[in-house]
Image (tube, helix red, strand yellow):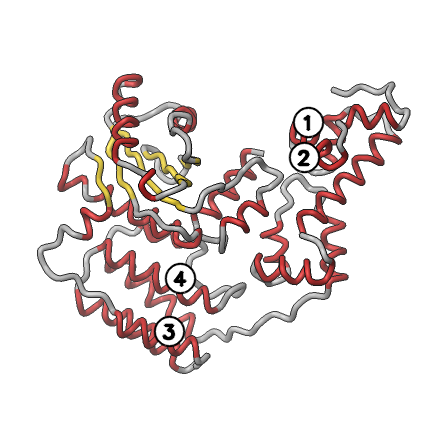
Amino acid sequence: MNAVKDQRLYRLLSGSYVSREDFNLDCSELDLSLPYEYYSVAIIMLHVPIPDLNALAEELVGAFPPPSVCYSFCNFHPDQIVFLSNIEKPSDQTDSLFLKLQDYLLKNHGLMATMGIGSVSNATDLIPQSYMEAASALDYRFVKGNGTIIRFQEVSGSTQTPVCYPHQEFEALYNALLSRSEQNIPLAIDNIILFMQKKQIPLYLARSICFDLIHMVNNHYQGTRTGFPESPLALSGMETAQEIIRMLQDWSREFSAHSFQAAEKAGIEEILAYLDQNCLRCDFSAYETAEYFHMTLPAFSKYFKDSTGQNVMDYSINMRIQKAKKLLSSTNLPLKDISEQVGYYNVSSFTRRFKLNQGVTPSEYRKITGNSTVSCH
């Protein structure tokens, strides 16, 4: 179950979910949710090896006070913990919170920590931008020193020379995408790359321009592979602007040679057959189902609801509950086995969903149906 949760959270950090409603839909059976509108990413760098970084990350997540929701990642760098915070208002993400965490690490574990903090956004597909900003802020520790808290705004405002951005080039790309000019789109992309080459821009700006380019192109070709790295998070691992430019040049050549055709939409009968075969899996994902049919999750959800009159997850949950009712009334299987057979990793999640749907627990349902002689463990 933890592996599936990590996969969905990584997808969120990668900007794959168009909205928090899509994330909440895809994770409704995993006890993951985004209740608030704003997001920010911070990276905590520890300056000594930690035997169990995941355990420390979970401990620190517990130190985040309401009304924030926080998820942690420890698999990017062996000395770093990435925090994705979901907050009610931008003002809730204050320096005092990170000062408390810094103080907590020093007092309870004797650890010095340097923290890079990205900007706050209210769009899930901009979460990776906040991550890249946090990474750029952390790089600035070579100027500010270890044991400091660095916001991205300090990095972007630190240069002594005016910072240039290819506004005109992006406007030309936007117009080419809007008019669906397959001839002018590659030309506009190349002009943005040429701007980056000529201006000798700093690393943080190269990351930002590259992300904006990925974001704009992928938004236009929704549901179609454009040849970019699977996740824009790959940009944070690039250590020079030249490395990013070379990656963009390679991608641009591939992009120019590729033809993007919209996939034919599947019929609702085909989708229902797929759901019947897959929705009882514990790792079932509405997002991956939409991908399978070459659709974005919002488009897939709308198409499914327009065709069936119900939400795709409601349909899947009903399939699970109906299967569970059949197993409860006709087999001697313990609840643990039934929960796994109908798509739940643990009995508590299964019991909670079953009672919410049926008004009684699985054990109570068994008694009602006269099948009460089996083990419930």
Mark 2 or mark 3: name the one nearer the start of the chain: 3
Label 1 sits on a secondary structure element that is helix
Label 2 sits on a secondary structure element that is loop
- Tell me whether the residue at label 2 lies in contact with that at label 1, contact meaning CB atoms closer than 8 angstroms: yes
Q: Which residue in the structure is indicated by mark 3? A: 174
Q: Residues within 10 Å of mark 1 (few under 14, many from 20)?
A: some
Residue 290 sits in which quadrant? Answer: bottom right
Q: Residues within 10 Å of mark 3 (few under 14, many from 20)?
A: some
From mark 4 to mark 2, how far is it between C-alphas?
A: 35 Å
Question: Looking at numbered disc 2 in the image, what kind of residue is underneath it?
Answer: Tyr
Mark 4 or mark 3: name the one nearer the start of the chain: 3
Residue 216 in picture, x, y percent from top left: 40, 66
From mark 2 to mark 1, how far is it between C-alphas?
A: 7 Å
- Tell me whether the residue at label 4 lies in contact with that at label 2, contact meaning CB atoms closer than 8 angstroms: no
Please give left or right for residue 336 compared with residue 69 in the image.
Answer: right
Q: Which residue in the structure is indicated by mark 1? A: 347
The quarter in which the N terminus is drawn is top right
Residue 207 in picture, x, y percent from top left: 29, 56
Q: Residues within 10 Å of mark 4 (few under 14, many from 20)?
A: some
Label 4 sits on a secondary structure element that is helix
Instruction: Determine the residue positioned at 41% across, 41% down.
Output: 88
Mark 4 or mark 1: name the one nearer the start of the chain: 4
Q: Residues within 10 Å of mark 2 (few under 14, many from 20)?
A: many
Mark 4 or mark 2: name the one nearer the start of the chain: 4
Which label is found at residue 344?
2
Question: Looking at numbered disc 3 in the image, what kind of residue is underneath it?
Answer: Tyr
From mark 4 to mark 1, how far is it between C-alphas?
A: 40 Å
Residue 168 vertical placement versus 127 (above, below)? below
Question: Looking at numbered disc 4 in the image, what kind of residue is underneath it?
Answer: His
Question: Looking at numbered disc 1 in the image, what kind of residue is underneath it?
Answer: Val
- Tell me whether the residue at label 2 lies in contact with that at label 3, contact meaning CB atoms closer than 8 angstroms: no
